[in-house]
Image (cartoon, grey):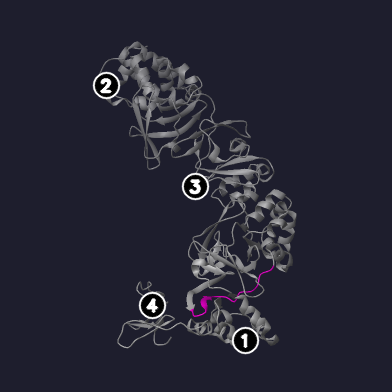
Amino acid sequence: MKNGMKSMNRIPIAKNTNTDQRYWVFWYVLYCFALVISYECCPGYEKVPGEKGCPAALPLSNIYETLGVVGSATTQLYSDRSNLRPEIEGPGTFTIFAPSNEAWASLSAETLDSLVSNVNIELLNALRYHMVNKRVLTDDLKHGTTLNSMYQNLPIQIHHYPNGIVTVNCARLLKADHHATNGVVHVIDKVISTTTNSIQHIVETEESLETLRAAVAASDLNSLLESEGQYTLLAPTNEAFEKIPREMLNRILGDPEALRDLLNHHILKSAMCAEAIIAGLTMETLEGTTLDVGCSGEELTLNGKPIIANKDILATNGVVHFVNELLIPDSAKTLFELAQESEVSESMNLFRQAGLSSHLTGSERVTLLAPVNEVFKDKRPTVDSNMRNLLLNHIVKDQLSSKYLYHGQKLQTLGDKELRVFVYRNNLCIENACIAAHDKRGRFGTLFSVDKMLTPPSGSVMDVLKADHRFSTLVAAIQSAGLMENLNRPGTFTVFAPTNEAFQAMPQGELNKLMGNAKELASILKFHMADEILVSGAVSALVRLKSMQGDKLEVSMKNHVIHVNKEPVAESDIMATNGVIHAVSSVLQPQASRPQERGDEPADPALEIFKQASALSKVKGKKTPVYSRLLARMKENSGGF
């Protein structure tokens, strides 16, 4: 349009409740800054001078004249040319699905020429195929029904979708229920044609589906595609098969189960004409998975890709749409192929460098625990023998599904370690690593994306504490309090373990009193322990954990750091065979029993504990600086040991 004028879409106003079938349609035209509104009457109504809108209802006319009124003048013209006019002007009761003027114009010149030649017999047959020998309103157009046309009683397929769209042989109903004296007219957006072939016949005769034809035969799906029912085949073209790597294609074609899953992933459980495939829709496949419909500009997408090349090839048992890319389901992929679409590419590089690819590409039934890329954002680990052994313990024997895992379940790894499953209200964890995304189940393996590198347990809680010089004071205190045997037995312990610095940071009088009273020491140490395993992934806002002393511990997450009783945890998830250890930088005390600082000199039991801690904290024959100073101070106060 000139002079800056814009044409805006027509917008239908709600139906007038007082006059059936009356709709207003108006055009918005923006000219400079002036809004101009143009009205036109709906078919069957006309304006009255001095009155608003189009209040005058025209008398009904026969179907032939109604075709001109509803905007299907080309159908009216061809009815005249094919000698159909006398029939649709005369007595009777008919329904005609009349192609719009635009529908006729969209036909190829070759198709149109074949219809209007041959003494117009083909045109007459085509028009009679659009007709039914009774009055059919939209209320009668039920999903999945068929109507017998007036051309050799050949069926017309009706689909009425949940979104309100009605299709006739996949042509969309544009204007419905226009009454005539001898029937009813519906305007559709396509010229429909007879359907006599099954989906299987279309696959067998279409040159561009040669590879699909061979795949269908190899998977024994021929009988399904020629059976009665209503299906949608998203038919991959030869070009689609050529786009995937040859090695992957050969593997799938040579694996009957994977091939069947691949093909079933291209078959929908119901007939879906293109008009009903709209953005936001989720369609269920015969394989049991779903396809997500979206949009990219004006193109529809399947699983994010605009791949529909040719649509609405109607069959007696459904509809076929050609697609130019393969839709490969997870169930036909190897673990490495699954990982290509997940945020675990860094992990897969590590497995490849460690020489473990054979476990992830063959027919071995395994489950891969793959840390997400975020785990390696600061540093990518070096692949040496230790890392290779650790990666082996990220591969679990047997193909699992996360929804069937249960609390306390034991999993065996290829590295001969035993991993425990922890089921929490807000998370599902395997040792210290929690599942970060829905698992992907492939042909032989399942991919679990996890939020951190997994730490297999090694030794009991006491073994782990003894092996770490940071906890030498705690180990000595546990021994003095008589709790060592308890922490060595099988169990499910969570220990918030104070470091040596945590004990040193206590007020001197309070520390002396604590270390000199075995009963009080045992009570305080039990306040740091719980008889259940709580890994960091189980902590969201707040978790209240009952300690072995009896009081509650409040465990929370702030800025990705675990806190216990509001004290930050220095290191979390140190895994042991009978529990988990979290290092803390302060000694926790129950609120009600926190002692006041006193200047009492340490009793003999306290001195003995520090002697033990000193021995445990020696590194390469030398005492750590913290304990050297601590022992020196104790000697000054006690006159020597």
The residue where tag 2 is placed is: 595
Q: Is residue 178 above or below residue 326?
A: below
Mark 4 or mark 3: which comes first in sequence?
A: 4
First reached walking from the N terminus: tag 2 or tag 1: 1
Examine the structure image and report whether residue 362 is included in the region drawn in magenta.
no
Q: Is residue 189 magenta?
A: yes
Q: CA distance from mark 1 to mark 3?
A: 73 Å
Q: Which residue is mark 4?
A: 24
| Dot 2 amino acid type | Pro
Residue at the spot of label 1: 83
Residue 405, above or below 507: below
Disc 1 crowd, CA 10 A, few/some/many (<14, 14-19, 20+): some
Of marks 1 and 3, the one in the foreground: 1
> Residue at 54% across / 40% down in the picture?
402
Residue 308, image quadrant: bottom right
Answer yes or no: do the residues labelled 1 and 4 have beta carbons within 8 Å? Answer: no
The stretch of residues the image draws in magenta is 180-196
| Residue 190, placed above or below residue 616 | below
Residue 374: numbered disc: 3
Under tag 3, what secondary structure? helix
